[in-house]
Image (tube, grey):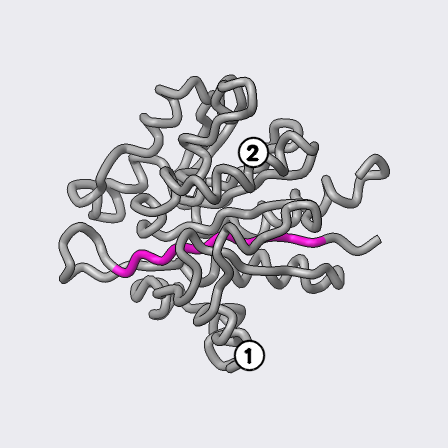
């Protein structure tokens, strides 16, 4: 049975310092998209404000720009998807089986306090659908509360880009907050791989999270496994 996946991307084009560009880490979208497309599933892209999605420049250079991301860049139809993303209020949550929050440092600014994204996530979660994220995408789960007022991540095992990885990436001083620490403050049971930048995925019921860009494909595969389960 065909499934529908909702990908969440950013609208933010730079750090607090306007001279430091950022945006969607493209492979975090394309790797997951490829996994779901191979299964013939329908996919759509939404962003906090709708419209155009900037791309993280570092992710578009060797050796980070791989075949999957290159293919997207060279496909006008795919690039058009990133030029005209939907707004949260244009999404009918009833039609989706999973939500997947992509990353890139940009999401730290526009994901956490998007009421529209929170509404979509809450509805899908309470309907028993799969909620997933990769890398900084977990910032989109920081402030989502359920109908009873509790935080979605409270008490759940999660992973996402670690503070150690921020330091090693050389951008820790430019971060608006420590996402790993903020997750822990909200009662999430944060986990990470022993080594930085290696693929690591954590599954806790219907919640699937990947630690870093290299975890995107494995995260999507785990989402697919959950959706392929007989009770889904």
Is there CB contact under 8 Å for labels 2 and 1? no
Write down the quadrant of residue 136 in the picture. top left
Q: Which of the two labelled residues, at mark 2 and mark 1, occupies the earlier sequence position?
A: 1
- Per the image, the residue denoted by label 1 is 77
* Residue 145, position as x, y percentages in the image: 48, 26
Closest to the observer, 56 or 166: 56
115 over 102 or under it: above or below: above
Q: How many marks on residues?
A: 2
Closer to the observer: label 2 or label 1?
2
Q: Residue furthest front?
A: 89
* Residue in the image at 66% along x and 28% along y: 205
Closest to the observer, 1 or 213: 1
Q: Residues within 10 Å of mark 2 (few under 14, many from 20)?
A: many
- Per the image, the residue denoted by label 2 is 122
* Residue in the image at 61% along x and 36% along y: 123
Secondary element under disc 2, as helix, strand or loop, is: helix
- Quarter of the image with the C terminus is top right
82 over 148 or under it: above or below: below
56 over 93 or under it: above or below: below
Secondary element under disc 1, as helix, strand or loop, is: helix
Closest to the observer, 183 or 121: 121
Left or right: where 72 falls relative to 36: left
* Residue 112, position as x, y percentages in the image: 37, 38
* Residue in the image at 30% along x and 66% along y: 57
Q: Residues within 10 Å of mark 1 (few under 14, many from 20)?
A: few
Left or right: where 157 falls relative to 49: right
Range of magenta residues: 4-13
Marking on residue 53: none
Cα gap from disc 2 to disc 1, whole angstroms: 31 Å
Q: Is residue 198 visible?
A: no
């Amino acid at each position: 049975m065909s499934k529908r996946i909702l990908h969440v991307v950013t609208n933010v084009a730079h750090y607090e310092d306007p001279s430091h560009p950022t945006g969607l880490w493209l492979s975090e979208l394309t790797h997951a998209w490829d996994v779901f497309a191979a299964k013939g599933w329908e996919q759509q892209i939404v962003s906090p404000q709708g419209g155009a999605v900037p791309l993280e420049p570092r992710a578009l250079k060797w050796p980070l720009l791989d075949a999957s991301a290159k293919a997207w860049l060279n496909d006008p139809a795919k690039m058009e998807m990133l030029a005209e993303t939907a707004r949260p209020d244009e999404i009918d949550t009833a039609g989706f089986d999973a939500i997947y929050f992509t990353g890139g440092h940009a999401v730290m600014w526009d994901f956490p306090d998007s009421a529209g994204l929170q509404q979509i996530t809450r509805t899908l979660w309470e309907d028993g659908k799969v909620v997933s994220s990769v890398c900084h995408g977990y910032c989109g789960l920081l402030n989502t509360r359920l109908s009873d007022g509790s935080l979605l991540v409270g008490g759940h095992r999660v992973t996402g880009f670690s503070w150690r990885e921020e330091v090693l990436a050389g951008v820790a001083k430019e971060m608006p907050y420590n996402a790993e620490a903020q997750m822990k403050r909200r009662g999430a049971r944060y986990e990470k791989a022993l080594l930085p930048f290696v693929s690591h995925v954590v599954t806790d019921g219907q919640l699937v999270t990947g630690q870093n860009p290299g975890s995107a494909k494995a995260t999507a595969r785990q989402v697919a496994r959950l959706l392929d389960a007989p009770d889904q």
